[in-house]
Image: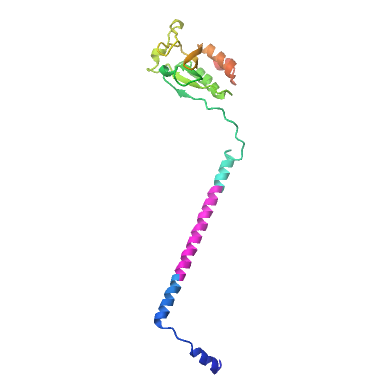
Amino acid sequence: MSKKEEKKKNNKPKLSSKENKRRLKELEKQAKLNEDNYEMVRLFKILLGVIGALAIFGLIFAYFHGDIFKKKEKVQEEIQNIEIMAGTAFTKQSGNYYVLFYDFNGENKELMEKVHSAFGRSNSTMKIFKVNLGSELNKSYKANTSEEVNTSSNKDLKVLDPTLLEITDGQVVKVYSGKEEIVNFEESTIKSDNSSSDILA
């Protein structure tokens, strides 16, 4: 190094210790900011990765379960599989619906369950409600003989086990009394997959 350069170097103004401390603090502050920014970017990338992985997993799950990418068939109005009290049979709703009366633990249980499920397989929008004639609250509505049967009003209602009533706007329009009549209706009107012989077997 030449004398001229050495002299020039020695002529540089020296920083005081106070200025050095201030500069050091600024550098530390800048380093901390850079570190914080790096951490934020890193966390953001991790978050994006997790969201992306969940989205991919969700799409795969939906694909294999037919929720997405498969043409959704037009589903018929859900048939109401609701047990009701016999005293409310005439007032469930407006329009047309059916009420199936039978003892849920009686000898016709399996047969009536098959008939009831046929409503669910039907292409129509027939609505059906069930009444348990074996329930203590409904036993007074059960007729012991065909002479006792009365479907003129809710108050005087008496039906055999089993009975299917077709009701329109609070009025009984058709009575299917006994398992043969009910099965014939199920076979001819509902067009279930089971034949009456299979059901009665």
Instruction: State the image quarter where residue 64 is shown.
Output: top right
The single residue placed furthest to the bottom in the displayed view is: 3
Q: Position of residue 128 (x, y in %)?
A: 50, 21
Relative image position of residue 90 (x, y in whole percent): 45, 17
Q: Which residue is rendered at x = 57% and y = 19% of the image?
A: 190
Residue 39 magenta-highlighted: yes
Picture coordinates of residue 169 (x, y %)? 48, 17
Q: Position of residue 173 (x, y in %)?
A: 51, 13
Q: Main secondary structure of the magenta part?
A: helix
Q: Answer whether residue 201 is visible to the viewer in this image.
A: no
Lateral position of residue 102 relative to residue 62, left or right: left
Going 50% across and 60% down the picture, which residue do you hit?
42
- Image quarter (top left, top right, bottom left or bottom right) of the C terminus: top right
Q: Quadrant of the N terminus?
A: bottom right
Magenta-tinted stretch: 30-55
Residue nearest the viewer, comparing 59 with 87:
87
Asked if residue 58 lies left or right of residue 15, the reply is: right
Please say whether residue 43 is visible from this viewpoint. yes
What residue is at 55 percent from the left and 47 percent from the top? Answer: 57
